[in-house]
Protein backbone atom coordinates (compact mmCIF):
# COMPACT_ATOMS: atom_id res chain seq x y z
CA UNK A 1 0.00 0.00 0.00
CA UNK A 2 1.37 3.34 -1.05
CA UNK A 3 0.13 5.18 2.03
CA UNK A 4 1.81 2.82 4.50
CA UNK A 5 5.04 2.86 2.48
CA UNK A 6 5.23 6.64 2.39
CA UNK A 7 3.85 7.25 5.87
CA UNK A 8 4.37 4.36 8.29
CA UNK A 9 1.40 4.17 10.64
CA UNK A 10 3.65 4.66 13.66
CA UNK A 11 4.64 8.10 12.36
CA UNK A 12 1.05 9.21 11.78
CA UNK A 13 -0.83 8.86 15.05
CA UNK A 14 -3.38 11.47 13.98
CA UNK A 15 -4.75 9.49 11.02
CA UNK A 16 -7.99 7.77 11.85
CA UNK A 17 -7.61 4.58 9.85
CA UNK A 18 -4.12 3.18 9.73
CA UNK A 19 -3.22 0.06 7.81
CA UNK A 20 -0.49 -1.93 9.56
CA UNK A 21 -0.36 -4.63 6.88
CA UNK A 22 -2.88 -6.58 4.78
CA UNK A 23 -5.64 -7.59 7.23
CA UNK A 24 -4.58 -5.33 10.13
CA UNK A 25 -5.70 -1.80 10.95
CA UNK A 26 -5.72 0.69 13.81
CA UNK A 27 -8.97 2.63 14.22
CA UNK A 28 -7.96 5.72 16.20
CA UNK A 29 -10.46 6.76 18.86
CA UNK A 30 -13.05 4.29 17.60
CA UNK A 31 -14.20 3.39 21.16
CA UNK A 32 -14.38 6.94 22.51
CA UNK A 33 -18.03 7.38 21.65
CA UNK A 34 -18.91 4.51 24.00
CA UNK A 35 -16.42 5.37 26.72
CA UNK A 36 -18.87 5.63 29.61
CA UNK A 37 -20.89 2.48 28.95
CA UNK A 38 -17.67 0.57 28.30
CA UNK A 39 -16.13 1.64 31.61
CA UNK A 40 -19.39 0.89 33.43
CA UNK A 41 -19.52 -2.58 31.90
CA UNK A 42 -15.92 -3.26 32.94
CA UNK A 43 -16.83 -2.38 36.54
CA UNK A 44 -19.77 -4.77 36.45
CA UNK A 45 -17.60 -7.58 35.05
CA UNK A 46 -14.73 -7.14 37.49
CA UNK A 47 -17.14 -6.99 40.47
CA UNK A 48 -18.29 -10.51 39.52
CA UNK A 49 -15.00 -11.90 38.22
CA UNK A 50 -12.07 -9.90 39.67
CA UNK A 51 -8.74 -9.52 37.88
CA UNK A 52 -6.31 -12.31 38.72
CA UNK A 53 -2.75 -13.23 37.75
CA UNK A 54 -2.81 -16.47 35.81
CA UNK A 55 0.03 -19.00 35.92
CA UNK A 56 1.62 -19.97 32.61
CA UNK A 57 2.09 -23.64 31.71
CA UNK A 58 5.78 -23.07 32.53
CA UNK A 59 4.90 -21.97 36.08
CA UNK A 60 5.32 -18.19 35.77
CA UNK A 61 2.79 -15.72 37.22
CA UNK A 62 1.60 -13.35 34.48
CA UNK A 63 2.18 -9.69 35.37
CA UNK A 64 -0.97 -8.61 33.52
CA UNK A 65 -4.20 -9.04 35.54
CA UNK A 66 -6.90 -10.89 33.60
CA UNK A 67 -10.60 -11.68 33.63
CA UNK A 68 -13.24 -12.47 31.00
CA UNK A 69 -16.78 -11.83 29.85
CA UNK A 70 -18.95 -13.86 27.52
CA UNK A 71 -19.74 -17.55 27.00
CA UNK A 72 -16.04 -18.47 26.89
CA UNK A 73 -13.08 -17.15 28.87
CA UNK A 74 -9.37 -17.53 28.16
CA UNK A 75 -7.49 -19.18 31.02
CA UNK A 76 -3.99 -20.46 31.68
CA UNK A 77 -2.61 -22.81 34.31
CA UNK A 78 -0.03 -25.58 34.63
CA UNK A 79 -2.13 -27.71 32.26
CA UNK A 80 -1.97 -25.20 29.41
CA UNK A 81 -3.89 -22.38 27.71
CA UNK A 82 -7.54 -22.92 26.86
CA UNK A 83 -11.03 -21.46 26.75
CA UNK A 84 -13.43 -22.40 29.52
CA UNK A 85 -17.10 -21.51 30.10
CA UNK A 86 -16.48 -21.43 33.85
CA UNK A 87 -14.37 -19.03 35.93
CA UNK A 88 -11.97 -21.36 37.78
CA UNK A 89 -11.85 -18.95 40.76
CA UNK A 90 -15.60 -18.87 41.38
CA UNK A 91 -16.80 -22.06 39.70
CA UNK A 92 -19.48 -19.95 37.97
CA UNK A 93 -19.95 -18.94 34.32
CA UNK A 94 -18.07 -15.80 33.25
CA UNK A 95 -20.09 -12.55 33.41
CA UNK A 96 -22.30 -12.03 30.37
CA UNK A 97 -20.95 -10.21 27.32
CA UNK A 98 -22.36 -6.67 27.58
CA UNK A 99 -24.37 -5.47 24.60
CA UNK A 100 -22.08 -2.43 24.22
CA UNK A 101 -19.10 -4.81 23.84
CA UNK A 102 -20.83 -6.81 21.10
CA UNK A 103 -21.80 -3.68 19.23
CA UNK A 104 -18.35 -2.11 19.43
CA UNK A 105 -16.52 -5.29 18.41
CA UNK A 106 -18.89 -5.93 15.50
CA UNK A 107 -18.68 -2.34 14.26
CA UNK A 108 -14.86 -2.21 14.49
CA UNK A 109 -14.49 -5.53 12.69
CA UNK A 110 -16.86 -4.39 9.92
CA UNK A 111 -14.96 -1.11 9.55
CA UNK A 112 -11.77 -3.15 9.12
CA UNK A 113 -13.34 -5.35 6.44
CA UNK A 114 -14.64 -8.28 8.53
CA UNK A 115 -18.46 -8.00 8.56
CA UNK A 116 -20.62 -10.27 10.71
CA UNK A 117 -18.16 -10.67 13.61
CA UNK A 118 -19.94 -11.91 16.74
CA UNK A 119 -17.41 -12.59 19.51
CA UNK A 120 -18.09 -15.25 22.13
CA UNK A 121 -15.11 -14.31 24.32
CA UNK A 122 -13.83 -11.04 25.73
CA UNK A 123 -10.51 -11.19 27.57
CA UNK A 124 -10.10 -8.18 29.86
CA UNK A 125 -6.44 -7.38 30.58
CA UNK A 126 -5.23 -4.91 33.21
CA UNK A 127 -1.72 -3.51 32.77
CA UNK A 128 0.01 -1.52 35.48
CA UNK A 129 3.20 0.49 34.81
CA UNK A 130 6.11 -1.90 34.25
CA UNK A 131 3.93 -4.79 33.08
CA UNK A 132 4.18 -6.18 29.58
CA UNK A 133 2.92 -8.93 27.32
CA UNK A 134 5.60 -10.86 25.49
CA UNK A 135 5.27 -11.63 21.76
CA UNK A 136 2.75 -14.39 21.13
CA UNK A 137 0.21 -15.62 18.57
CA UNK A 138 -3.50 -15.95 19.37
CA UNK A 139 -4.06 -19.54 18.36
CA UNK A 140 -6.33 -21.15 20.95
CA UNK A 141 -9.40 -20.30 18.85
CA UNK A 142 -11.13 -22.78 16.59
CA UNK A 143 -11.68 -20.67 13.48
CA UNK A 144 -8.81 -18.48 12.25
CA UNK A 145 -11.06 -16.92 9.60
CA UNK A 146 -12.51 -14.82 12.45
CA UNK A 147 -10.59 -11.61 13.30
CA UNK A 148 -9.31 -10.28 16.62
CA UNK A 149 -10.62 -6.94 17.89
CA UNK A 150 -8.51 -5.24 20.57
CA UNK A 151 -9.70 -2.12 22.44
CA UNK A 152 -7.28 0.08 24.41
CA UNK A 153 -8.47 2.09 27.42
CA UNK A 154 -6.57 4.11 30.03
CA UNK A 155 -2.88 4.99 29.95
CA UNK A 156 -0.98 4.65 26.65
CA UNK A 157 1.01 1.62 25.59
CA UNK A 158 3.23 0.56 22.72
CA UNK A 159 1.76 -2.39 20.86
CA UNK A 160 4.23 -4.67 19.11
CA UNK A 161 2.96 -6.00 15.83
CA UNK A 162 5.28 -8.57 14.32
CA UNK A 163 5.25 -11.13 11.56
CA UNK A 164 4.46 -14.82 11.25
CA UNK A 165 7.69 -15.82 13.02
CA UNK A 166 8.54 -14.77 16.56
CA UNK A 167 11.89 -13.43 15.33
CA UNK A 168 10.37 -11.21 12.59
CA UNK A 169 10.90 -7.53 13.19
CA UNK A 170 7.90 -6.01 15.01
CA UNK A 171 6.31 -2.62 14.32
CA UNK A 172 5.88 -0.38 17.34
CA UNK A 173 2.37 1.04 17.38
CA UNK A 174 1.54 3.63 20.06
CA UNK A 175 -1.99 3.07 21.37
CA UNK A 176 -4.07 5.54 23.37
CA UNK A 177 -7.41 5.51 25.19
CA UNK A 178 -10.15 4.60 22.70
CA UNK A 179 -7.93 3.15 19.96
CA UNK A 180 -9.00 -0.16 18.44
CA UNK A 181 -6.75 -2.59 16.57
CA UNK A 182 -8.27 -5.25 14.31
CA UNK A 183 -6.31 -8.07 12.70
CA UNK A 184 -7.59 -11.00 10.69
CA UNK A 185 -7.37 -12.74 7.33
CA UNK A 186 -3.72 -12.89 6.25
CA UNK A 187 -2.69 -11.12 9.50
CA UNK A 188 -4.65 -13.36 11.88
CA UNK A 189 -1.66 -15.31 13.19
CA UNK A 190 0.85 -12.50 13.39
CA UNK A 191 2.92 -12.30 16.56
CA UNK A 192 2.03 -9.39 18.82
CA UNK A 193 2.68 -8.09 22.32
CA UNK A 194 2.87 -5.00 24.51
CA UNK A 195 6.07 -3.24 25.67
CA UNK A 196 6.46 -2.54 29.40
CA UNK A 197 4.12 0.34 30.25
CA UNK A 198 5.58 3.66 31.34
CA UNK A 199 4.19 5.25 34.52
CA UNK A 200 1.31 7.55 33.59
CA UNK A 201 -2.12 8.66 34.75
CA UNK A 202 -5.47 8.56 33.01
CA UNK A 203 -8.39 10.61 34.28
CA UNK A 204 -10.87 7.72 34.17
CA UNK A 205 -8.67 4.71 34.94
CA UNK A 206 -5.79 6.11 37.01
CA UNK A 207 -2.40 4.44 36.60
CA UNK A 208 -3.55 1.56 34.47
CA UNK A 209 -4.41 0.39 30.99
CA UNK A 210 -7.29 -1.92 30.31
CA UNK A 211 -7.42 -3.85 27.06
CA UNK A 212 -10.46 -5.72 25.79
CA UNK A 213 -9.65 -8.51 23.34
CA UNK A 214 -12.64 -9.87 21.44
CA UNK A 215 -12.46 -13.25 19.80
CA UNK A 216 -14.63 -15.92 18.31
CA UNK A 217 -13.16 -18.81 20.30
CA UNK A 218 -15.60 -21.71 20.03
C1 LIG B 1 -3.45 -9.51 23.76
O1 LIG B 1 -2.66 -9.81 22.89
O2 LIG B 1 -4.16 -10.38 24.30
C2 LIG B 1 -3.63 -8.09 24.24
C3 LIG B 1 -2.95 -7.05 23.45
C4 LIG B 1 -3.07 -5.69 24.08
O3 LIG B 1 -3.16 -5.57 25.32
O4 LIG B 1 -3.04 -4.67 23.37
FE1 LIG C 1 -2.89 -11.74 21.91
Image (tube, rainbow, N blue to C red):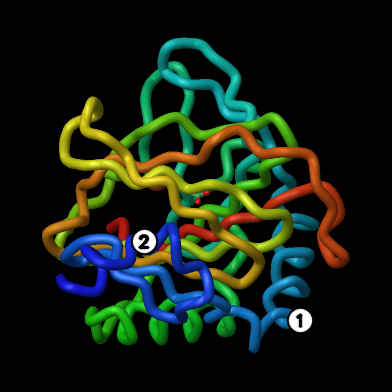
Please state the horizontal and vertical placement of residue 44, each as a whole percent of the image: 76, 67
Classify mark 2: residues with Cα within 10 Å, few (<14), some (14-19) or many (20+). many
Choose top left, top right, bottom left or bottom right for residue 138: top left
Between disc 1 and disc 2, whose residue precedes?
1
Determine the image quadrant of residue 22: bottom left
Which label was assigned to residue 129?
none
In the rendered image, residue 101, in percent from the top left (x then y), is placed at 54, 76
Q: Observer-nearest residue: 211 or 76?
A: 211
Q: Which residue is mark 2?
A: 215
From this view, report whether residue 66 is shown above or below residue 15: above
Say what secondary structure mark 2 lies in: strand
Question: Residue 173: x and y, percent?
Answer: 45, 53
Instruction: Tell me the SS state at disc 1.
Output: helix
Instruction: Give the distance between the C-alpha atoms of the residues marked 1 and 2, in whole angstroms.
Output: 22 Å
Name the residue beneath numbered marker 1.
Answer: 36
Query: Dot 1: within a 10 Å radius of its alpha carbon, few (fewer than 14), some, or many (20 or more) residues?
Result: few
Ligand 1 within 8 Å, label 1 CB: no
Residue 37: quarter of image: bottom right
Image coordinates of residue 16 in percent, x first then y, are: 46, 81
| Residue name at image x 45 percent, y 29 percent | 134
Residue 93 seen in the current view: no
Is the CB–ligand 2 distance for label 2 below 8 Å?
Answer: no
Amino acid sequence: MITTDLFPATLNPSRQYETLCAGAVVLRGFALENERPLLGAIETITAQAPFRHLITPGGFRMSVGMTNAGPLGWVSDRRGYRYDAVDPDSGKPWPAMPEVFLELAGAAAARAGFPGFVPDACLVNRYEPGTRLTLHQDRNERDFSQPIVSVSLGIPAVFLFGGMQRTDRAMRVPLAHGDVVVWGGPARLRYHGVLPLKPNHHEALGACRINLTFRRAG
